[in-house]
Amino acid sequence: MPELPEVETIKKDLTRRIKNKKVAEVKINKNKVVKEPSGNKFKKELIGKTVKNIKRKAKVLIIELSGNRFLVIHLRIAGWLLYGEEEKNARVVVKFSDRTVLNYMDQRLLGELRLRKDYQDLDFIKRLGPEPFEIDGSDFAKITKKRNASIKSLIMNQNIISGIGNIYAQEALFLAKINPKRKSNSLSRREAMRLHKKLIEVLKEAIKHKGSSVDLYRVLGGQKGGMEERLRVYGREGKKCFACGEKIKKITLSGRGTCFCLRCQK
DNA sequence: AATGGGACCTGCGCGC
DNA sequence: TGCGCGCAGGTCCCAT
């Protein structure tokens, strides 16, 4: 899904476009994605609310509404939002009183929307570890020392460090010159500090470029992000490493496709 | 407790 | 052309 940079981009754009707007109409085209409350109750509670603020926690988007309600959106793998006119393929459609429309798009139906009184009490929010920005390199090195899983699955584990997914994990490991298969606790302090620094750098770079549109994902206005052209290893199997010219290799690591440079990443 | 594999979904591109 | 398979940016559930 959208990882931290994509969700941050959506958050910024949403703030600009729907803050203070009032919900006039709601259409649910796929019940599956509306987890709570179900069906008509969701519609009934959402209609008439005004958007107060938009927040993000790791990869979770939180729309704060009047009447002490929060619309919590987890985009998972294939969810995205499109603002403008009503879309035919939208799973959920929210129309505002100025006749503009926010569409929830999600080809794979794995994402979820929840309308609730709080968001901090949700289990998956409570369990989230800090975002890379919220700790320093030394904290990160201590975390890596304690774990035996591969370093790639560690940085993708939201309960340990949050916001990183399969694209930016690969990118940061490439920039830090660390082989994704390495055991977390085999990293030297120096390597861990370097990885932490690169995680922050790549997330910031991706935010600056409005995220990666490697498949259907688009920014709120429908345009592509700009980060996909800048990716160093993700999706570059068989192509030349930008640093050394070696062919980029692809393996499966804890069930996820993983590209890296055998020569650069030790 | 920590770790890895499968399940949840749809649709695309590829090889035969 | 048509079919089956593998694969896709995430996370939960389960067995070990």
Image: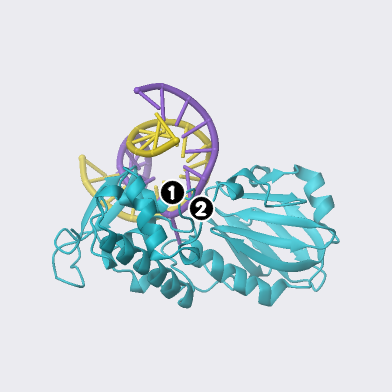
Chain colours: A cyan, B yellow, C purple
Q: Dot 1, how many residues are within 10 Å of its Cα: few (below 14), some (14-19), or many (20+)?
A: some
Residue at 25% across, 57% down = A188
Residue A124's mark? none
Q: Is residue A83 left or right of residue A198?
A: right
Residue at 19% across, 72% down = A243
Quadrant for the C terminus of chain A, please.
Answer: bottom left
Between residues A173 and C3, which one lies in front from this camera angle? A173
* Image location (x, y in percent) of residue A230: 34, 73
Q: In this view, does A213 lie to the left or right of A87?
A: left
* Image location (x, y in percent) of residue A162: 48, 56
**Mark 2 belongs to chain:** A
Between residues C6 and A250, which one lies in front from this camera angle? A250
Residue beneath label 2, please?
Answer: A129
Residue A43 appearing in the image: yes
Q: Which amino acid does label 2 sit on?
A: Gly
**Mark 1 belongs to chain:** A
Asked if the residue under mark 1 is in contact with the one under mark 2, i.e. CB atoms within 8 Å, the reply is: yes
Residue at 17% across, 64% down = A264
Residue beneath label 1, please?
Answer: A157
